[in-house]
Image (spheres, helix red, strand yellow):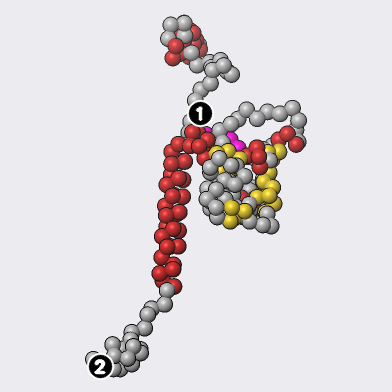
Amino acid sequence: MIGTGILKGMAVTARNFVGSYFDKERLITVQYPEERDPLPENYRNFPFLVYDGDDPNAGLRCVACKICEKECPPQCIYIVKSEDKKPDYIGKPQFYAKVFDIDISVCMSCQICVEVCPFEAIKMDKEFELSRRERFDALLMRKDDLAKSNDYYRRISPTDAAEVDAKLTAAAEAAAKKKAAAPAAAKPATPATSSTSGRPAPSGASS
């Protein structure tokens, strides 16, 4: 019969329309911004810089290696490396990004910068309410705008953050063991001495 599909479609629409007055699960419209659907953990928008501790300047994991700047397809990352070193959050002298800018009007949220970073210093954010009245400088995110704590990263991506924390902890423990073992390996062996004269015993001497 001609028009059967249209009638079936209208029946589904009518059933959902009437049901929406009695079943809350049928209310698919969210009253944004008062109501918000939770974002999935793997949702990503624009990058941000992770810092450890309480000081975003001392705690930034970024050491300005510029790998993300080189690998970025739209070339929206701009980094100026420092000429000096300063202590990080654990007191280790490190180079740091004197300037770290991301133009979010160009960024395509590809996550390549995250994948190539060897220091787990840059991650993808979930913040999407970034509209601005201006087109240019207002869409250029500076280092201070990009810096967010590791606690924030744990809140928005608990699974990935736990994996990163475990990886960094294991790397720090391995480095500490290597550092502790280095002095023992560098210490010269004490030469054997004769029991009678106190002089080193000849290599071919017999007891």
Q: How many marks?
A: 2
Mark closest to the chain's N terminus, 1 or 2: 1
Please tell me in which quadrant of the rendered image residue 184 appears.
bottom left
Q: Is residue 18 above or below residue 108?
A: above
Residue that label 2 marks: 206
Look at the image and tell me in which quarter the C terminus lies. bottom left
**Secondary structure at numbered mark 1:** loop
Looking at the image, can residue 85 be seen? yes
Residue found 74% across the figure and 27% down from its top: 133
- From the viewer's side, name the closer residue of 161 and 57: 57
User: What SS does tag 2 mark?
Assistant: loop
- Residue type of the residue flagged with mark 1: Leu
Q: Residue at x 31, y 89 (%)?
A: 194
Cα–Cα gap, marks 1 and 2? 80 Å
Q: Which residues are magenta?
A: 42-46
Q: Which mark is residue 199?
A: none
Give the number of the disc on residue 39: 1
Q: Is residue 1 visible?
A: no
Q: Position of residue 60 (x, y in %)?
A: 58, 46
Report the mark closest to the observer, 1 or 2: 2
